[in-house]
Amino acid sequence: MPGAGGAGNAGDPFGFGDIFEAFFSGDAFGGGGGRQQQAQDLATELLLSLEEVVAGATRMLHARMPVECPTCEASGCRPGTEASLCTECNGNGQVRQVRRSVLGQMVTAAVCPRCGGAGMEIHDPCPDCRGDGRVLDDVEIEIEIPAGIENGQRVRMSGRGPVGPRGGPRGDLYVDIQVAPHERFAREADDLHMTLAVPVTGMVLGATREIETFDEPVEVDIEPGTQPGRVLRLKGRGVPHLHRRRRGDLYIHLTVEIPEQLDEEQEALFRQLAELRGEEVAPPGVGFVSRIKSAFQ
Ligand SMILES: [Zn+2]
Ligand SMILES: [Zn+2]
């Protein structure tokens, strides 16, 4: 593992190797050379409810990541001992390599093989972090969720990720946002859509319904003679636009609730209504199957 230069401990008593490699699989030294080695970034996921998206929220994130080793205070040295300047690179973290070619001499800089770019040599590594200056820990981080954030968006928490080796700067923490589907509302950009089933009598005669929104409940009027498929719009009851005050709208898609069962009296009333309106209907006792049959005769 890079960054553990001089530690020299055999084996991996904590089983950290694989996990560290997953976090720091890239070039941990950047282009800079020198002593401070930047950690790689870490990504985690956060599941939000639509309520939290509309109102904005403060949540605690839980992530397992490398933190400064408390035993050696990130120095990587056994307490009471100190690191010394690397004798190979004299603390630069980089070594110059001179190559001769047909074009002449070429000088390139490379990460110091002795100290792994840290510039320091640890002679007696800390027993808890094996000279790396970091240990894995469960970290709790507060995150502010801006209202209006969308499913699949990624929040970058600059400098809140894993710490670098031996007190190096922290990487970034990326939070991938997932928004759980809502049982009543579907989101489309900043707008919300819902379906409201109204009994046939309410569609014909008009009705009032109370709609639960993410704010206070709103009463909507269904006008007499409303057709199924009609869409009502509640302005400003949708999702806030990310980083703006404007909010989307709530669209209520009306469907008609047709009774599947009628008692005798109700059926008699429907038949009387059909007769009054001159509408032809199936005779009593004729089920769906026999109607299909008669259509093919
Ligand atoms: Zn340590
Ligand atoms: Zn060195």
Image (tube, grey):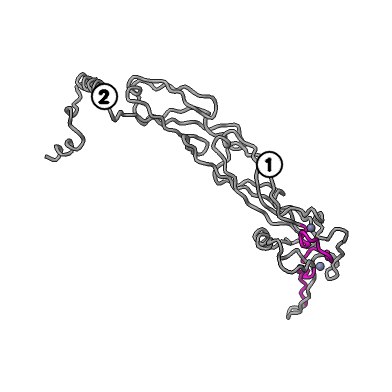
Give the structural element (helix, strand or loop) at label 1: strand
Tell me where the magenta segment starts and ends, as one range.
Answer: 105-133
Residue 243: image tag: none
The reply to whether the magenta stretch includes residue 81 is no
Residue at 19% from the left image edge and 27% from the top image edge: 281
Residue 204's spot in the image, x, y percent? 32, 22
Give the structural element (helix, strand or loop) at label 2: loop
Left/right of residue 260 with respect to residue 93 in the rendered view: left
Nearest the camera: 149 or 86?
86
Tell me the quadrant of the picture where the N terminus can be found: bottom right
Q: Name the residue under label 1.
A: 142
Mark 2 Cα shell of 10 Å, populated few (<14), some (14-19), many (≥20): few
The reply to whether the magenta stretch includes residue 114 is yes
Mark 1 Cα shell of 10 Å, populated few (<14), some (14-19), many (≥20): few
Residue 50 occupies quadrant: top right
Q: How far apart are marks 1 and 2 (CA)?
A: 59 Å
Q: Three-letter amino acid code at disc 2?
A: Asp
